[in-house]
Image (cartoon, grey):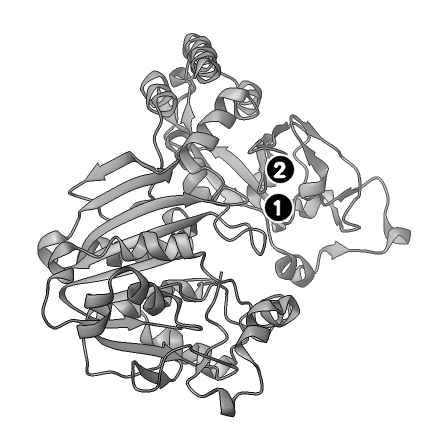
Amino acid sequence: MRENEVLTSISSRKSPFNSQFAIRNSQFRKDFGIFFTPDWVVDFMIGLISDDKITQKRLSILEPACGMGQFLQGLKRNKKSLYDRAKKVGVEINRSVYARFPQNEIQMVFADFLLWESAQKFDVIIGNPPYGIPSLSEHYAIKVDDKTKAKYKTLFRTWHGKYNVYGAFIEKSVELLKENGELIFITPASFLFLDEFKKLRAFLAENGDTEIIYMGEEVFEPDASVASVVLKFIKGERYSGNLLLSEYSGGQMILHRKETNWKGDIVTFRTPFSDALKRICGARLGDLFDIRISPRTPEIKKNAHIIRDRKRIDENYLPILNGRNLKVGEIIYEPLTEHWIHKSKVGSLRGYFNKPHIVIGLGFRGERQLAAAFDARAYPWMGDVYHLTPKKEFSRAELELSEEDIARYLNSAMARQYVMDTFREVTYHLSITQLKEIPLPTTFEQVDRAAQLLSVALTNSLER
């Protein structure tokens, strides 16, 4: 989601591109990963600047990765007096297009924002940061060499796993804020849930007041379909732990969550159904089961016991299954991966592969539909499949439902509705952390009550 990976040149004479060409040429925008922020969103975000900042006599404003300077232009369009008296800075890395500002009206800095060193602190930082995993791989849009990526990892304490650069932009911007300074960014909503952002969430919770406004998945269509949020962050230790989650829909704000002791846990949405289901159910999935993911392809390739030669296959070998073998409530025990392993060596992959257990697909099937099944044959798996094994301290006396019953519940409309209400369309799959949060009935009475609850919720929805 970027108006910004293509960065700005102040002088059109030095640019090989005409600005109108840059905006209109869709192939150019695609090549550079440019997704311009709609004006109504820019105006909405400008409107979030606090009144005390608007009336402040001297104000410093920064737009990182500013591209065409949409947010500085939005400030000029919406709050001209504030624009005129503020010290304005735009940071860009790419001179391929130019900003539409008269010379000397803003201070332009041509630099990699994540490596930019600035002694100046800012009252307001606003914009649309780059979105993507930095890599030279053809699979990723943001091309960053290994040396630069290594620098990022050492500079940013929130960097974790396959980190998305917008998380680093948030951390860097918070560090550049003055005390009581405000950060207003539009970003993907993925940092609300994904494990890669657990350090970022903790960082935000520790350093100030976090307000998140869910904007839905249509903000950047047709160029991109990505669930987006506006993040407004006020820096100050006295605000730490404050969290407000709202949704902007139909011109109105809907409150979902308000806390004063947030520690950086995942930020979930709430509905009457999701709240009631949690009250009805006796446990969460993570209370009773350990959840693990299958061996990934590199591990499979390194395992000396795995073969791909069909001539050496006999009745003592099992095919290794993957996500294609898993349907809703059904496992296709067919050799779709062309990987085989001797029955006696299945334990070399994972010890629990030898025991019947519940499996869940990493990705959804259809509209937020989980795909769960009970693997009674205890086959080996690889790839995008989760495995549920009962915790050692778990007693069967605590649970009336069998593992087959639990798999059916996970495939049910009840579980699907909870996932839709709680996690929305933010991610294309559920992480282990999210799966752990799914409410789990422990008795058949709770299952019946949950089904009745869903029926009432759907009826009320239709009546509205």
Up-down relation of residue 252 to residue 35 (above or below):
above
**Residue 347: which numbered mark, if any?**
1
Is residue 264 at least partly visible in the picture? no
How many badges with numbers are in the image?
2
Residue 435, position as x, y percentages in the image = 45, 37
Residue found at the far bottom of this picture: 14
**Residue 426: which numbered mark, if any?**
none
At a point 58% along the width and 56% down the height, the residue shown is 223
Left or right position of 307 against 167: right
At a point 53% along the width and 43% down the height, the residue shown is 429
Up-down relation of residue 74 to residue 143 (above or below):
above
| Mark 1 or mark 2: whose residue is earlier in sequence | 1
**The C terminus, quarter of image:** top left
**Residue 354: which numbered mark, if any?**
2
Q: Amino acid at mark 2?
A: Asn
At a point 53% along the width and 87% down the height, the residue shown is 15
- Front-most of residues 44 and 407: 44
The answer to whether marks 1 and 2 mark residues whose Cβ atoms lie closer than 8 Å is yes
Left or right position of 341 against 215: right
Q: Residues within 10 Å of mark 1 (few under 14, many from 20)?
A: some
Residue 55, position as x, y percentages in the image = 11, 62
Picture quadrant of residue 321? top right
- Front-most of residues 183 and 294: 183
Up-down relation of residue 121 to residue 95 (above or below):
above
Calculate the distance from the C-alpha at mark 1 to the C-alpha at mark 2.
Answer: 7 Å
- Front-most of residues 176 and 92: 92
Q: Amino acid at mark 1?
A: Gly
Up-down relation of residue 163 to residue 274 (above or below):
below
